[in-house]
Image (cartoon, rainbow, N blue to C red):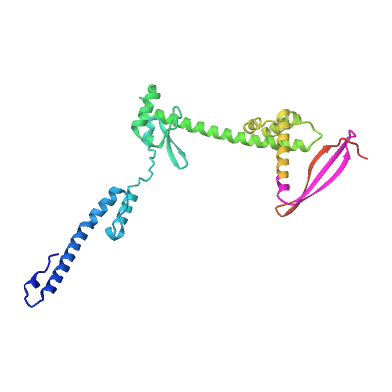
Amino acid sequence: AAVNTSLLNNSNIPKSFTVIWFICNIKRWLTHIRDNDQKPTDHAAAADSENSGDPPSTSEAGGGAHKLRCKAQLNQPSPKFRRYREEYIQYGFTCTVINEIQYPQCVLCTELLANESFKPAKMLRHLKTKHSSVAAKPADFFRRKERAFQSQKKVMTNQKTISAKAQKASYEVAYLIAQATKNPHTIGEILIKPAAIAMSQIMHGDKQAQELKAVPRSDGTISRRITEMAQDIKSQLTDRVKRGKYALQLDESIDVANSAQLLVFVRYSFDGKLHEDMLFCTTLSAKCT
């Protein structure tokens, strides 16, 4: 700001007042120059803040901080996944979906590649590197391979399902045999399995009968199933008893071998209901009186 010197030429004003007025104006002028030198402009403050990594203050840059935050959010890359196209079959690749993401899978060696490999150059490189003998085959050749691959996947899925069902059926049969204590474990192999196969073959045909043959029912398998179920029942009962209050009842008895047996029963509360089960049975060293 320029200093107003028009009052200096007025002779009616005392010299002392003129000197004081002049000093005050000079001081104000120097203060104004100093403030202008120290205060950066909006563009300079934003540039300095961007170079230093710190957002500019709202008092100096106004809406500059908001603009920088929006710019930083726009610069963050969003995850993008490539998608399968029908023409990729000419490179020998089909599509496999895992967690809603498509992945290229070779129909010849069933190798699964990354999602970013959905590029003709990468798939062609895989075909020429690992399957050079069929690289010149037409697209129909790879389509036939794809149909065979999909059929093989269905067969493997069905076999896995049958195996899980056969496992469950084996435990069910073992449980029934364990309840029929008078029959030996071999009854599953010599009677139950042949009878079930014969009934299924008559009622449903040979296909369902062949599936029943996958159910394991040998003597050793049934014995192992019964032991595993007994351990599981014991573990479940122990966990239930530990959760709350319970009461015990003891009794002794003599079996057919004239050995003393101690029977322990437990009554407990589970799911709002009272339950009563045998906790264990053990042989006593002394005789009952």
Q: How many marks?
A: 0
The location of residue 37, given as percent across then percent down, is 20, 57
Task: Looking at the picture, tell me which residue is in the foreground, 195 or 97.
Answer: 97
* Residue lying at the far front of the rendered structure: 16
Magenta run includes residue 174: no
Residue found 52% across the figure and 34% down from its top: 154
Q: Quadrant of the N terminus?
A: bottom left
The location of residue 51, given as percent across then percent down, is 28, 48
In this picture, is 40 found above or below 249? Answer: below
Q: Quadrant of the C terminus?
A: top right
Residue found 8% across the figure and 71% down from its top: 8
Residue found 71% across the figure and 55% down from its top: 272
Task: Looking at the picture, tell me which residue is in the foreground, 98 or 41.
Answer: 41
* Residue lying at the far right of the rendered structure: 289
Is residue 65 something that shows in the picture?
yes
Magenta run includes residue 240: yes
The location of residue 197, given as percent across then percent down, is 69, 32
The location of residue 246, given as percent across then percent down, is 77, 50
Magenta segment, prevailing SS (helix, strand or loop): strand
Left or right for 22, reference 80: left
Q: What are the residue bounds of the magenta stretch?
A: 239-268
Is residue 218 something that shows in the picture?
no
